[in-house]
Image (cartoon, helix red, strand yellow):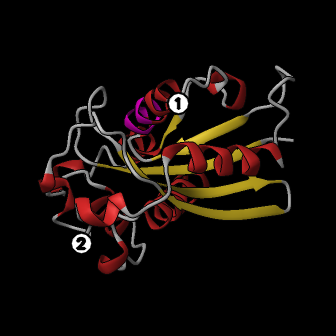
Amino acid sequence: MVKQLFIDTETTGVNVNAVGMYQLGGVIVAGRREEEFEFNCDIFEEDEVNTDAFENNGMSIEKISSFPSPEIVLGKFIDLMDKYVDRYDRRDKFVVIGYGSEFDQQILRNWFYKLDDDYFGSWFWHPWVCVMNLAMFACQVSRAEMQNFKLKTVAEHLEIPVVDEKLHTALYDAKLAREVYSKIVACLGI
């Protein structure tokens, strides 16, 4: 059975090697079983913070510092994944799907590394599926008409309703990416 993990991260900036991850969210789809999750998490002391990253979602460094430690959140995330995947079975992993998934993969990999967890590759197939790339393929004829290629713009272009107030929260963005993915897959007959 294919086990899909639609995922998104929220971070303190865009430099994948320096910023902190303060939110991890998504949807696990394993056969008929589905589970949504969203974890808020404090960042590491050495993480770079660009406050411009907070302008769209009302987050602040003060709010982030009140979240549980990365160690606690990693434990919860592993407990969740462990319900679906056997990290010791090299044939049992998640197919990870996200909008701009390369960024999220690097952020999450660095987070595991900072937490001295060597099992990142035990959970996820490589490469991750990038919904943005699929959308570019599907929208290549109409791309010139689009102002940008952000998740919101692509979703609206595909006539998927967007709730602006929920954008830039990990669970909502992962769910929206799933809707975009599903619409493209259906249109392409995949």
Q: Rate crowding at label 1 as few (under 14), some (14 to 19) or many (20 or more) other CA atoms within 10 Å.
A: few
Kind of element beneath mark 2: loop
Image x and y of residue 95, in percent = 67, 37
In the picture, measured across the screen, residue 107 lies left or right of residue 91, that is: left
Q: Decide: is 107 above or below 69.
A: above
Q: Give the residues in magenta.
A: 102-107
| Residue linked to disc 1 | 115
On-image quarter of the C terminus: top right
Residue 50 shows in the view: yes
Image x and y of residue 35, in percent = 72, 63
| Residue linked to disc 2 | 58
In terms of depth relative to the viewer, which is nearer, 103 or 161? 103
Dominant SS type (magenta): helix
Residue at image point 66% right, 31% down: 124
The verdict on residue 151 being magenta is no
Image x and y of residue 184, in percent = 52, 53
Amino acid identity at mark 2: Gly
Residue at image point 29% right, 47% down: 141
